[in-house]
């Protein structure tokens, strides 16, 4: 009897509404964001290229990242390496680390010594900061002050602010 009642109930029940097809709205959003991000990366790559070519080495590092990862254009690992080298010479530590993940404070201090010996006042200020704090080797306050004084007299504003400590 129960089976007959159940069959009757099924037969007289309104048909079940079709299940709605759930469209994942995020898939369209993701595609749009991906397209949007690709446009942003292309523009960034163009802008960073111009700035890096003008000698603004701070922009060579992010340009190198875009080239390495193939964002905003084709991947170019060798081009990225060249940009990281240029940025590293321009005091962008992350670029130095990109070239050598084992790049440590002692290496940075050696690089700063070399740059300073070659007359780059930016490296002299970086070296003075390392000497002041004992980063990558022993602290040497007299030499740090001397380097800051020379860089300040040569018009390097960051050195003047640092030498007033």
Image (cartoon, rainbow, N blue to C red):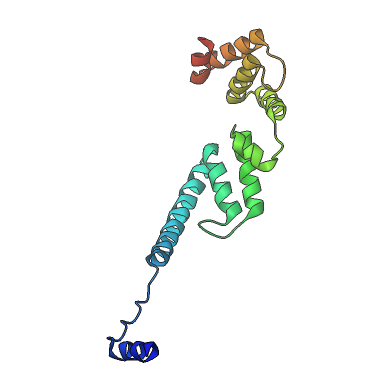
* Residue in the foreground of this view, choosing between 67 and 27: 27
Residue visible at 72% across and 29% down in the picture: 107
Give me the residue at 72% from left, 26% from top. Answer: 106
Q: Give the quadrant of the N terminus.
A: bottom left
Q: Is residue 32 above or below residue 2?
A: above
| Residue 160 screen position, x and y as percent | 50, 14
Left or right: 126, with 12 as reference point: right
Mark yes or no: residue 52 visible: yes
Comparing 21 with 8, the one in front is 8
In the rendering, at what x and y percent does residue 159 appear? 53, 17
Q: Quadrant of residue 102?
A: top right
Residue at 68% x, 13% y: name it: 139
- Where is residue 108 shown, x and y percent of the image? 68, 29
Residue 156 visible in the current orientation? no
Q: Nearer the viewer, residue 135 or 13?
A: 13
Residue 36 relative to residue 123: left or right = left
The residue closer to the viewer here, 35 or 117, is 35
The number of numbered discs placed on residues in the rendered structure image is 0
């Amino acid at each position: 009897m129960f089976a007959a009642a159940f069959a009757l109930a099924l037969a007289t029940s309104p048909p079940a509404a079709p299940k709605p097809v759930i469209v994942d709205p995020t898939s369209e959003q993701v595609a749009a964001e991906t397209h949007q991000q690709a446009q942003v990366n292309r523009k960034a790559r163009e802008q960073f290229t111009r700035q890096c070519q003008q000698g603004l080495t701070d922009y060579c590092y992010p340009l190198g990242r875009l080239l390495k990862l193939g964002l905003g254009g084709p991947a170019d690992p060798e081009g990225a390496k060249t940009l990281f080298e240029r940025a590293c010479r321009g005091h962008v530590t992350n670029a130095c680390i990109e070239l050598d993940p084992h790049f440590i404070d002692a290496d940075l201090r050696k690089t700063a010594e070399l740059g300073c010996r070659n007359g780059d006042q930016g490296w002299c200020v970086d070296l003075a900061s390392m000497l002041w704090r004992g980063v990558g080797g022993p602290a040497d306050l007299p030499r740090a002050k001397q380097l800051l004084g020379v860089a300040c007299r040569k018009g390097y504003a960051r050195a003047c602010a640092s030498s007033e400590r």
